[in-house]
Image (cartoon, coloured by chain):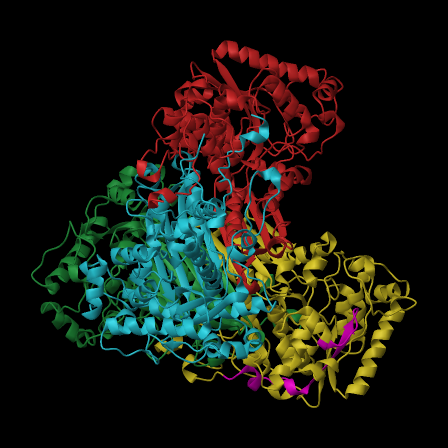
Chain colours: A cyan, B red, C green, D yellow
Amino acid sequence: MATPEAAQPSAASITPHTGKLGIMIPGMGAVATTLIAGVEAIRRGYAKPIGSMSQMGTIRLGKRTDNRTPLIKDFAPLAPLDDLVFTGWDIFGGNLYDAAKTAAVLDRDQLDAMKPFLESIEPMPAVFEERYVKRLTPKHQKVGKNKCDLANQIRNDIAEFKAKSGTDRQVMIWCGSTEIYIEQKPVHQTLEAFEKGLTEDDPDISPSMLYAWAALKEGIPFANGAPNLTVDIPAMRELSKKMNTPICGKDFKTGQTFIKTVLAPAFKTRQLGVAGWYSTNILGNRDGEVLDDPDNFKTKEVSKLGVLEHILQPELNPDLYGDMYHKVRINYYPPRGDNKEGWDNIDIFGWLGYPMQLKVDFLCRDSILAAPLALDLCLFMDLAQRTPSLRGLGIQEWLSFYFKDPDAAPGVYPEHDLFIQSMKLKNTLRHIMGEDLITHLGLDYYGE
Amino acid sequence: MATPEAAQPSAASITPHTGKLGIMIPGMGAVATTLIAGVEAIRRGYAKPIGSMSQMGTIRLGKRTDNRTPLIKDFAPLAPLDDLVFTGWDIFGGNLYDAAKTAAVLDRDQLDAMKPFLESIEPMPAVFEERYVKRLTPKHQKVGKNKCDLANQIRNDIAEFKAKSGTDRQVMIWCGSTEIYIEQKPVHQTLEAFEKGLTEDDPDISPSMLYAWAALKEGIPFANGAPNLTVDIPAMRELSKKMNTPICGKDFKTGQTFIKTVLAPAFKTRQLGVAGWYSTNILGNRDGEVLDDPDNFKTKEVSKLGVLEHILQPELNPDLYGDMYHKVRINYYPPRGDNKEGWDNIDIFGWLGYPMQLKVDFLCRDSILAAPLALDLCLFMDLAQRTPSLRGLGIQEWLSFYFKDPDAAPGVYPEHDLFIQSMKLKNTLRHIMGEDLITHLGLDYYGE
Amino acid sequence: MATPEAAQPSAASITPHTGKLGIMIPGMGAVATTLIAGVEAIRRGYAKPIGSMSQMGTIRLGKRTDNRTPLIKDFAPLAPLDDLVFTGWDIFGGNLYDAAKTAAVLDRDQLDAMKPFLESIEPMPAVFEERYVKRLTPKHQKVGKNKCDLANQIRNDIAEFKAKSGTDRQVMIWCGSTEIYIEQKPVHQTLEAFEKGLTEDDPDISPSMLYAWAALKEGIPFANGAPNLTVDIPAMRELSKKMNTPICGKDFKTGQTFIKTVLAPAFKTRQLGVAGWYSTNILGNRDGEVLDDPDNFKTKEVSKLGVLEHILQPELNPDLYGDMYHKVRINYYPPRGDNKEGWDNIDIFGWLGYPMQLKVDFLCRDSILAAPLALDLCLFMDLAQRTPSLRGLGIQEWLSFYFKDPDAAPGVYPEHDLFIQSMKLKNTLRHIMGEDLITHLGLDYYGE
Amino acid sequence: MATPEAAQPSAASITPHTGKLGIMIPGMGAVATTLIAGVEAIRRGYAKPIGSMSQMGTIRLGKRTDNRTPLIKDFAPLAPLDDLVFTGWDIFGGNLYDAAKTAAVLDRDQLDAMKPFLESIEPMPAVFEERYVKRLTPKHQKVGKNKCDLANQIRNDIAEFKAKSGTDRQVMIWCGSTEIYIEQKPVHQTLEAFEKGLTEDDPDISPSMLYAWAALKEGIPFANGAPNLTVDIPAMRELSKKMNTPICGKDFKTGQTFIKTVLAPAFKTRQLGVAGWYSTNILGNRDGEVLDDPDNFKTKEVSKLGVLEHILQPELNPDLYGDMYHKVRINYYPPRGDNKEGWDNIDIFGWLGYPMQLKVDFLCRDSILAAPLALDLCLFMDLAQRTPSLRGLGIQEWLSFYFKDPDAAPGVYPEHDLFIQSMKLKNTLRHIMGEDLITHLGLDYYGE
């Protein structure tokens, strides 16, 4: 029996990595500094890239009895950490050593050991629009006559970075704040309307869209760590396809939602009903401050709420999930800083409807969880760009694994189940490298 | 690209269900009464078979855009609930109405509504050996001149039940207590040695083995809800193969271990390290009482401890899981009765080694979680028996989904990850029914 | 050494209980029906008055070695449960059997066993003003030409109840909803202004004030289970003094705040600092529905937030409590009904400032906790009314034990510490009964 | 009305502090080094003595409206921190800088800043007997011909310390390990028997008893941070009385038991029943290692289990506490080091018997909680020694506040309720300083 997939590509068709890979980051706060300081610490042998599937993960090839389980980084032709060069934009200015101290994620000693390196990176002035993030006050921002001008300033920054850094390829990843909630408007529907909107300063074009547009125009893959609309609009999909440049989902799947997309599939696969799911978060970093504004929280809320519906499919399982009450709260709570805590109460029911409860308390660290996801996305988006069978797809659905809000082709529902996402990612790697896909059928061990 | 699996069978080769299916249960306490009363309540329309994949679960066929997602029970030719007939053995005697009242799992009102039905089922006297369960005192037990005689009394019970009940096929499922921990001895290595041991009253042949041997001799599939050694020995595998009769893993995967096999794969897929995992349980039912004996607890402990090692594979990920400290405790705590509570503290670490914690408190119900697993196992084991491509395999690895201690072919490591188990189960159903396997690659939605 | 208290009264001066005591309840929902059904169940010997200090509590008299520890109800001349007669007002109408079924607090079987009794109590039409509780729609309400007329209708109800029930004395206790937050206005400052406001339909006179005014005018003690302003205004204190009729604090101290006033004194007595305290609640009863309105929540929030400041006294302990971040959230969460859950995260710090955390998850039952408090308050307020040395005080500070928002004399800070409150209550009972106060000095056991 | 206490002493009768106070500590591990490094850090102004009632606590004097609330250290004539001199004994040798590093309680930076000071303190060789602590292997121990000789070596150490340090007074406080559980034997019944046992090497005389005997013989107050029997025997009480030298309770009340003695009084004062209380602890320090031995755990268990019975008094409240199931578990769990975690599940019941649950998770730090208790005990025991009305009492019951296992006069039950203990301590201070005792009656604010 054949799997229904298309003919298998040859690993040889992937353009090999050479030279340097530039990582360009709009928003150089807690996540970006944790990523960059971390990559440097790893390069120096101070620490391990824990949490990064691309660096620490293994992939089983062939049968269980074959004992072929290489590291992913030894299997797929990813750019090595030594070849990464970082830059970015930020509204607060200052160098990354200072930014990392303010973020207070990493130990002071650790930062001090890499002080000259961190001081050597200074964010470029960023595009900012108060309407989108009211709680922050920029100190270091671009001025332009309209949004088109601002977007072209970004393109110019890219060109200068290419020249100065000598990088062969670039990836852009948004690590800035959550913008306020907006819905799709006509300006988002076609590339033409969008580009017209740029020159007309359309209020529905947010700063993150300017970065995404600039990146795609330059043939640079774009990933989005926040729940902003950004590339989740027809205009950007059109541009992505046109430029043969990958885009993907949005909003790093870190703390509570990470756990949610683990537990919900477990309930579903066991056909345990869910009567209610109450999730609350406390966090005290800048992210918490921004999300204290209801308009910004709404963007995050929509991203977080969609998860359960997609996984549990109440329309297919009305007896189990038809009456589920789902509530998500985020509270700014300064005593914790970046050390977020998520508490979930889940009311489930089993055999004959008898109720049970599950409570989960996750004392996590926001940027520590996000940084390795950002790293993997950069490396995999770069790989996608070099892989003929992926580059042209536009949306890289196989990277759904990393997002609270994964993207998928129009008409196809996104996969939120972390385990389906993981399988999709790994089978995609097997596929592009010419290995057999894994189905976990495994009857042949028994001599069928 | 072809999956490496064998040629696909035709669904037509499966013997259809006809007549009645007999469910024979050694140990008619909390789980068995909850199962039987529950099935009757469902047949009468009082309640739903929540928690049962075979009854409530759906299976996606074809592509996501095909919208083919039937109920499993409408897809695979399972025996319908209306055709199940129950019997069993118990050391306490009395009818099932009284046993269910003692178990105190289901509401009194619910039991009263089915009183005549439950009163009509009276367990047969059971085989009991004090050495294996010291905390219980039997009131209703078989007497025989040796273990061979006792085992043949069970075979005789089976024969009488077949005749009296008019069932066409039977399945046996152990829902009795956890026996003390024993290791494999020579008597367990071959069928010949085992059958000699029966006549010689070998002390290493436990009561549960007598039931399993009797079932297999009669061509009846045998499943094991407890962590006892039972069929997990070469002699039984030999008998299973010889009789073309399915066996499978052991120890229902219900509360804490269910959650553990959900979270551990999540940490692993995200390459989050685990420094320690402390699990404690409080429960107040008969199971808790039996497990208060250290010898019986050891059997359960071994079953519970193996889970993490198999999922996390410390040998492949020494930086992440090489120093993990795993501890499992079970405490008899009468105030809760059957309403078990499991509390887990998990010390994980992420990017650069920064520590985080996850705490899970599961207020569950032991028998409510176990009953639908028992049901599914009966129906799927019966299906396996009717399916030529499965029957001859002996061990039904595709049913690993249901067990704390899944069984696999010699030389093949068992799969503990709930999501791999679920995929294995569903792809096996697709396979025997002639449907395409699912790999979650899904590139073809993008017009590759 | 003498304690600085006034000369001790004689127990003989207390008017003994005779006849019947009428309990008049505005708001006959979950709390009131749980109280009344419970008292009846206790009278019939079906259950115990657990949670009621007046019924189950003991009081130590004399030295530890004296072994004099009577039940409080055997020590103080309280009205016995057999002599209580219940009535009240409600906006939903219907009898108490139906109201109790809707509240879904007590088991159906329990209610059915007392059905005729519960059906025999029918609430009188209530005063309602939409402005104060927007989420509810009354079906059974008084109509009057102004607030003075409505208040006098209540006085008339009281008079009729006295006559019809043959009760010798009455107590009124508000078990209705939380009204919206209002601040003191001129109309609340004097009795004269208030009574003028009644005739002028002043919008700042809420329904609960009408009941309190009517009760006090009739010489009936008034207690308040909700955080409404009600008697917490100079006008009512004036009336209370003038009528020699007791009033007391407000808002039953049940779930999370009960625990908070237990833990905060513990931290303080050990000089452990508090950096932050985050409290969230989920509840699904009518109370939760009403509190989902931000205006009503504010009344509750103010009541809940004051607690920590009063106990921890940051002005005296700025190093320990000066920077505390305190947040309280209430979420309407229907899956739970009356079974509220409160989760607290507390960030404390100890020796040299090292941080620690305490998490408390309280799976409680709102009305089950409140009902015995309501009972005690009725009995103790009646006792106060019969005790010369208490009656004239107006505010009964010794009953602070029962309230989230205890009341105290102007210029005296209220005591929120549950243990000080308990000591205050018990020493007050000792005092009025002519027993030695307890100081816990206890040096004399050592032959000093 | 007069309180029944004896005539009030005059504050003037207390011998004032002069010169230096020597603190002598058997067992210089985590608690002792945290105490000593902490006191030094506080003396240098690096940190605050958080958790110490003697240093940070205030005491209300007079009426609430008097606004007299001095710090306790400004009220009672305690020795100031500047005048403390530390020494002690330990079986591992090495200086305190190294011991503190091994304990890993305080941050390395903090220790480094005081390195010369900590290095200057070297423990003297300790008395050790393997039978009492099997899990530890001493490197630095006294050798003697019998226990009498060993005890006199301790007395000699004391004499040398007095001379060398120039301290005017000393206090001894046991901060060593938990010894195995032993019960009282004849050798413990009289001083004469005990002293005979010393020369006869009686196996029931433990090392901690040698220290206590030596201290009392030298007129030095002795406090006990561990649950060992030590001074809890008639022989030691006799010696304490004879020498006019204070002794007190045992086993620092820190993490879980601290919380337990807070919650249990809360349930009791509200007459909430307790069906079960399950407490589990995970800790990874040397204490955890020692307590992994069942014989040593038993000593701790007995100390921890007694708490609830004494507070809840099931004999007085059989309906509420008569059937309580109480279980305490301690698990050695290395990933946490000194950062202990205690998890409690409490099954309570309220009005009519309805069940509720409370779960408490305390992420604490063992030595951070213990160190300030050790400090307070030293200062208060020294004060007791200088106070005529306390010195002669032997047992200082007013210091019960600090102990899991408080001591009381024969025939008097000990007080475990933290709030009674706190009141007892503060009223004792008021009493010896000639202030009015506080009863919380407070009727006089109302012009009675």
Residue shown at 45%/64% (left/top)? A340
Q: Nearer the viewer, residue B270 or A161?
A: A161
Q: Residue furthest left?
A: C145
Q: Nearer the viewer, residue D169 or B303?
A: B303
Q: Residue furthest bottom?
A: D18
Residue shown at 64%/41% (left/top)? B302
A431 lies above or below D39:
above
B21 lies above or below D60:
above
Q: Looking at the rendering, in which quadrant would you find the C terminus of chain B?
A: top left
**Does D81 appear in magenta?**
yes
**Does D321 appear in magenta?**
no
Q: How many marks?
A: 0
Q: Nearer the viewer, residue D70 or B212?
A: B212
- Can you tell which quarter of the image residue A354 is in? top left
Is C88 situated left or right of B239 in this image? left
Image location (x, y in percent) of residue A435: 51, 42
Query: What stretch of residues is rendered in magenta?
Result: D70-97
Is C182 situated left or right of D333 in this image? left
B410 lies above or below C161:
above
Residue shown at 13%/68% (left/top)? C198
